[in-house]
Amino acid sequence: MKNIFKLISLLCVAVIMISLVPVYAEGEDGDETPPLEPEIERCEAACVFNVENDKMLYEYNLTKSVFPASTVKIMTAIVVFDYYGDNLDTQITVTQDMLNESAGNKIGFYPGEIVTVRQMLYCMLVNSANDAAIILANSVADSTAGFVRMMNEKASWIGAYDTNYTNPTGLHDDLMVTTVQDTATIAKYAYSIPEFMEITSTSKYVMDATNVSDYRSIYNRNCLISKFYNVDYYYPGAIGMNAGATTQGGYAICAAARDDASKLTYIAIVLGAEAEGTTYYNYINAIRLLDWAFDSYEYAKVLSSSQVICELPVNLSSTLDYITLVPQTDITAYLPKTIDLSKDIRYSYNTYADSLDAPIEAGDVAGTITVLYGDEILGSCPLITTSSIAKSEFLSALAGIKEFTQSRLFIGTVVAAVIIGIIYIFVVARKREKKLRKLGSGRTSRPSGYLG
């Protein structure tokens, strides 16, 4: 009895332990299926989107009005790049008025110091330096206020309609607001500037000595890029953008990351995040968003160039009666990893004719095919023939005869001949009838005075 009791106890413990193990759905390859949505917490708004396909994958409070914090510097850089173009080595002389406007995080420049636009962009985007932002703003416009007008005009021009800037640094102002949706629009634009991405992906920048200062080592404040300020949030796939915080606006980040194997790039944005000790929820949420996106989506081949779509009858050939059609190219689409390609992907095709006449060359276009996922068109391409087929001269001649005998000309000619024949017979018959009547009339008549 004791042994039985022990066995029952062990079984109960085993059942309890099994019930505590988390259960995941598994795909065909045995991998754990990613959650339908990422776990986002303790922030005002967030999103993640795919760059290559311009596709928003997840959004949280997408259009909620929030404070932008240091993400303002993304627009500051955009306006600077627009103004200077390739002339980033243009020199700027720092003035005391510029320095008087600067507050918050600063590099510590000097009045009369000669710097370049490129150096200030690195200082502003790598270290989030506010004095560099002010120096750039005043070098572009007649004043910081003039530069802010340019920022707002550019924001409207690229479609960030719910954003209002009041300074180029991101320091808090109750009137300076944005949305995650607008920040995504601005981030897409910034991503298209190669120099911007190169600068924001730099973990450490060494600024050359100037006329009044030795060289400076500038470290990236975006902890996804650099381990200098915090090693806990380093993200190997991170390739740039911006992070920062204000007391009123909370912690913000706009983070781009790329996976070379999948050839996919994502931008995650978190605004108004909280912090607790050394735990920063802008980074935690950004990493969750990026991990979820990489785990949940991929490029999948939805149509293969070797896939037989249909057959068409072949005319005028003595060797083959049918020929197969295949897609001209493969079609690859950006899709959730969870879809069942065999069930969720549909095809719609049409051919230009119900049959084909020989000769046929391999690769001849004979129709089109379209790939669909739900109501979304994933792509389309021509349908082509898979082989070459020679023409039979004998069958071709017979077909020519058949075609001629079925033509309007032939039918008209035959009808005309029949009609002419009938008319001819009728005319001949009439002539013969008249002749017979004439002959008959001659035999029955008698000369006058004839007695018989």
Image (cartoon, rainbow, N blue to C red):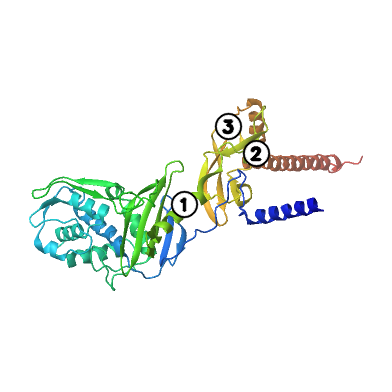
Indicate the amino acid at tag 3: Ile
Residue 134 vertical position relative to residue 336 in the rendered view, above or below: below
Residue 47's image quarter? Answer: bottom left
Residue 55 vertical position relative to residue 394 in the rendered view, above or below: below
Left or right relative to 313: residue 57: left
Depth check, front residue: 16 or 320: 16
Which class describes the residues within 10 Å of circle 1: few (<14), some (14-19), or many (20+)?
A: some
SS at mark 3 in the image: loop
Residue ID for mark 1: 291
Image quadrant holding the C terminus, namely top right
Depth check, front residue: 158 or 286: 286
Residue drawn at (8%, 48%) of the image:
211
The alpha-carbon separation of the residues under discs 3 and 2 comes to 14 Å
Residue 110 vertical position relative to residue 429 in the rendered view, above or below: below
Residue 142 visible, this orientation = no
The alpha-carbon separation of the residues under discs 1 and 3 comes to 51 Å
Q: Earlier in the sequence, mark 2 or mark 1?
A: 1
Residue 360's image quarter? Answer: top right
SS at mark 2 in the image: strand
Residue found at the very far front of the displayed protein = 2
Residue ID for mark 3: 360
Residue drawn at (31%, 63%) of the image:
245
Which class describes the residues within 10 Å of circle 3: few (<14), some (14-19), or many (20+)?
A: some
Q: Residue 362 location in percent, x, y? A: 56, 31
